[in-house]
Image (cartoon, helix red, strand yellow):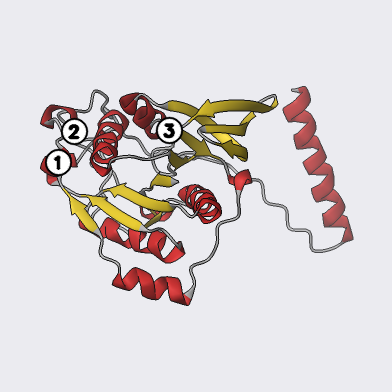
Amino acid sequence: MHIIVPIKQVPQSSAVKMDPVTGTMIRSGSAATLNPLDLYALETALCLSERSAGSVTALTMGPPSAAQILKEALSMGASRAILLTDRLFGGSDTYATSYALSKAIEHIGSFDLIITGERATDGDTAQVGPGIAAWLDVALVTYVSAINTIVDRTMEVERLTEEGYQAVRLTLPALISVVKEIAIPRLPTLRGKKRAMNTPIEEWDARTIGADIGKIGLKGSPTRVVKIESPKVARTAEVHIASDEDSMKGAVDRLIDIIEEVYHG
């Protein structure tokens, strides 16, 4: 079984910066890490490949620095790592990103399953996975919490819904996005880290994958961020210092009064 896992390099939450002109995220020079939710997709893929003597290809799109997260995927056990890197990809929204990744997957060739994380922690849209499935015209199941069986080319999974769990049967090749409940990500071993150091990362540009220039980057992105505002939090506080029994009682009484004012007007 050949499984492809698209992963993403995301900025650490404290280091997010936006370009006020283009509305895109400034990724250069900021601390970045592997999207935490993609770890569950990687672990799921690795477990399936171990059971079927298969292989796992980690795929990402980003600047050259994104090679760092591919090294992490290799150290966990991925067989192959591919980096889509080209200035032409810059500024891609979820539509353009899913198109570029789908073209890369077509260039990779045959596969049985694509597994993505639930969403990326920077954009928080959960649109890229379904977008890839749409471009490739393969079956899609989102929010998968368990994989029950895979027999021949049929997979049975459970997906998490607001009402509970839903059993779904799908035919491979397919794409699934997974939630945290599905697995506990492993830690890279020393052997895995050494292997990652010696495994080359393939770098592909837009020409390599045969991408239509009009469908990638800012030019190929139908959605734009038109305005960015930082939330302003203004709070007025009432401070009560409880230094003895009387002041403590007074503070508690005042807290009760405030709660009653909020709930009863």
Along the polypeptide, which appears first: circle 3 or circle 2?
3
Residue 97 appears at what percent x and percent y? 28, 35
Q: State if disc 2 and disc 3 touch (CB < 8 Å).
A: no
Amino acid type, mark 2: Ile
User: What crowding class fits label 1: few (fewer than 14 Cα within 10 Å), some (14-19), or many (20 or more)?
Assistant: some
Indicate the amino acid at tag 3: Pro
Q: Which residue is mark 3?
A: 173
> How many other residues sit within 10 Å of disc 3, few (<14), some (14-19) or many (≥20)?
many
Residue type (three-letter) at the residue carrying disc 1:
Ala
Question: Which residue corresponds to mark 1?
Answer: 206
Q: CA distance from mark 1 to mark 2?
A: 9 Å
Residue 243 in the image: above or below residue 128:
below
Under tag 1, what secondary structure? helix
**Callout 1–callout 2 Cβ contact below 8 Å:** yes
Q: Nearer the viewer, residue 62 or 131?
A: 131
The label on residue 216 is 2
Whole-number angstrom distance, CA of label 1 to CA of label 3:
25 Å
Q: Is residue 156 above or below residue 85?
A: above
- Labels 3, 2: front one: 3
From the viewer's perspective, is 204 left or right of 111? left
